[in-house]
Amino acid sequence: MRRLVLCLVLTMSLAPAGSAFAKEPVKAKVCGASDCRETKDHGSLMALTEGGPPTDPPTRGAAWYEVIITIAMDREHHDTFPMAIVPSAGLMRGGDSAEGYTWMPVSSAAAREYRRITRGLAPFSAGSLEGVGAPEAQVDEVVLPPEESKPDGGASPLPWIAGGLVLLGLAGALLRWRGLPWPKPAQS
């Protein structure tokens, strides 16, 4: 759900701004290591939420800023969404460690706005940035290959033949023992 809302936030700049549009950013708080700055300017908010399609995370940590975007869901309800901005990589990260992170490139307008807001603001250290490096594989389902089946050609007939011969021999011995004559071959 958070990914869907994050995508909505990031594509809001493409939607026409109208008074009937209920879901829109109303505030952004950008924090560094020791201070935070807030903006409610509509133009700044729209620029701060601009991002491109999902991409790979940075290969290692870099200095970054925390951004908390507040979205007005309607007149009474607001929701907040945390993001991280990595200016040196030109990337923003949405999501969280529980649901996973989504990395996106920032637009040039967003990069300009972030530079303006973070001017003089010390970033968080590179080592504290989560979700960097190669994406971790998540296993949802394990599918095993089908078991190798032996060709269904049936069993060897030799045991059946041997069993039949034994039964014929027993039948012949029984006939002899009872004193019955052996059948004579037909005369041609």
Image (tube, rainbow, N blue to C red):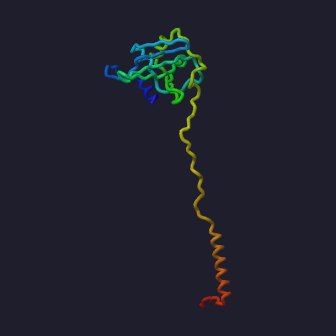
Pick the residue in front: 114 or 90: 114
For the point 54% across and 27% down, the residue is: 97
Q: Quadrant of residue 156?
A: bottom right
Would you identify the image quadrant in which residue 73 lies? top left
The residue at the point 56 percent across, 14 percent down is 33
Residue at far top of view: 120
The picture places residue 92, in percent across and down from the top left corner, at: 50, 21
x and y percentages locating residue 133 in the rendered image: 59, 26
Q: Is residue 14 visible?
A: no
Task: Where is residue 124? Give x, y as percent.
Answer: 56, 16
Q: Using the image as rendered, state which of residue 177 and residue 77 is in the foreground.
A: 77
Q: Is residue 96 above or below residue 48?
A: below
Quadrant (top left, top right, bottom left, bottom right) of the N terminus: top left
Above-or-below relation of 141 to 21: below
Rendering coords of residue 176 (x, y %): 67, 87
* Number of numbered labels in the structure image: 0
- Residue 82 visible? The answer is yes
Q: Is residue 51 left or right of residue 61?
A: left
**Image: 42 above or below 177:** above
In depth, the one of 127 and 50 nearer the eye is 127
Residue reaching furthest to the left: 20
Residue located at (51% from left, 9% from top): 119
The quarter holding residue 141 reads: top right
Left or right for 28, reference 163: left
In the picture, the quarter occupied by the C terminus is bottom right
